[in-house]
Image (cartoon, rainbow, N blue to C red):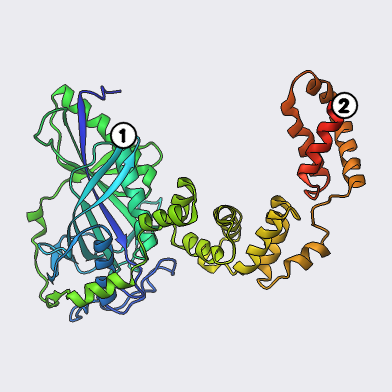
Amino acid sequence: MTDESSYEIVVGLEVHAQLLTRTKLFCSDTAGAGAPPNTQVSAISLGYPGTLPRLNREAIQLAVRLGLATNCTIVRQNYFARKNYFYPDLPKGYQISQHTTPICRAGFLEVTTGEGTRTIRINRIHIEEDAGKSLHAGDGLSSLDYNRAGTPLLEIVTEPDIRSADEAFTYVTALRKLVRHLGVCDGNMEQGSLRCDVNISVRPRGEEKLGTRVEIKNLNSIRFIKKAIEWERERLVALHRSGQPIVQETRGFDESTFTTYSIRTKEDEDDYRYFAEPDLPPFTVTEEMINAVRKAMPPLPEEVEKRLSADYSLSAYDAAQIAGDTELSRLFFELSDHTKNYKAAANWIIGPVKNAAQARELGLDEMTIDMKTLARLIALIDEGRISHGVAAQKVLPALLESPGLDVDGFIGGQQLFVQTDAGEIDGWIESALTKHAQKINDYKKGKKGLISLFVGEVMKQSGGQADAKIVTQKLLEKLNNS
């Protein structure tokens, strides 16, 4: 391992976010993942001669939305350029992108790690079209799927402000939450709708001059971003120490070994021979358009988090969990309209409701749940008439199946109300103490924590219906007086 104090890394990130538009950037082909290969294509997205592109206005609006959220200046006068290079999954032999006029400039995101809060500057956000996808078979042959070709992307480019793998991890995590919150991108890295390129160099600590930059391409996991930076730091420092030259190159990442490998020497900008796209006119982002986008934006996560803490007295953890997810926020605010027990509302949304959605493989936006009924369930728990465990395990599934469920009637019919009958509870206590008779003397010798074992056994035997307070009180009386 290298000496952490002798060298520092300088990292800039290029994050590619696939936009949640209904159609592609320059034609009406459907955009979206999951379709059979080469079924979401047309003469335009396949680059046939004689076809002409037409700009998708929705992509411009989403770009402006992210630019506003990341404190960028929105560039009013824009044009597209051709970026020329050959690769089999690039149908036209060039990519339509932006060059000297990115739609968003000079923004920033603040991130917090164990080292404190830092501002990561964003150099630019520009719009471009995606390439297709190469599918490599084990026999040495490759197939091409052009469904993704022409899908609108935003490339979010930072300044070289990142100084550790942890900072990179935190930045991409924050950016991913933001684009999902804004409805700009679904953030699904496994499917490739959010991808990251890492630009990294090393230099002796205290030196101002930047070292030779290496690019690591197409990282599709935040964890892999961190691992790639950690590995590449070690490799570059070792080369620097030994006096070997560091080559400006593009490298890939091996997900099985967490190592990088050389792909090709890195192209310079001149190699792409940028020139203005002749088939697309320049476009203007007006003040009216910016104001309309700003008005339609949801509150930013930090604004929601502050509101949850100030108006609902939620803990920092609960507020952060809810504010970081648009659907969790929506469900919490809907539920809070029907109950004043905001802590319980947060616990239900973060816990049982979210878990139920995951178990059913549904998005939270697909969950059908009557919040007034859920609030009634919370009230019954507060009144001590049903336990939280029974409510979550037995009542919530029924409520999800029947949103208009009469919870009082259901709980009564299923005999789920908390059991307070002394005789019934005494029977469960006797059974629990008999089962754990060997622990009774340990309790009397001072192992008072065993009370939770006895209470847990009673609750298990009662199916969660026994009143835990009564059970605890009766057990203490029985154990202390016997």
Q: Which residue is painted at 55% across and 56% down in the image? A: 342
The residue shown at (13%, 37%) is 212
In the structure shown, which secondary structural element does the residue marked by tag 2 occupy? helix
Where residue 67 sits in the image (x, y, percent)?
Answer: 24, 62
Residue at the outermost top position:
445
Q: Is residue 384 left or right of residue 347?
A: right
Q: Amino acid at mark 2?
A: Asn
Left or right? Give the position of 336 relative to 115.
Answer: right
Quarter residue 375 falls in = bottom right
Visible in this render: residue 190? no
Q: Nearer the viewer, residue 276 or 334?
A: 334
User: Is residue 435 positioned above or below 285 on the image?
Assistant: above
Q: Which residue is mark 1?
A: 115
Within-10-Å neighbours for mark 1: few <14, some 14–19, many 20+ = few
Q: Please state the horizontal and vertical placement of residue 124, each as a whole percent of the image.
A: 18, 57
* Residue type beneath disc 1: Glu
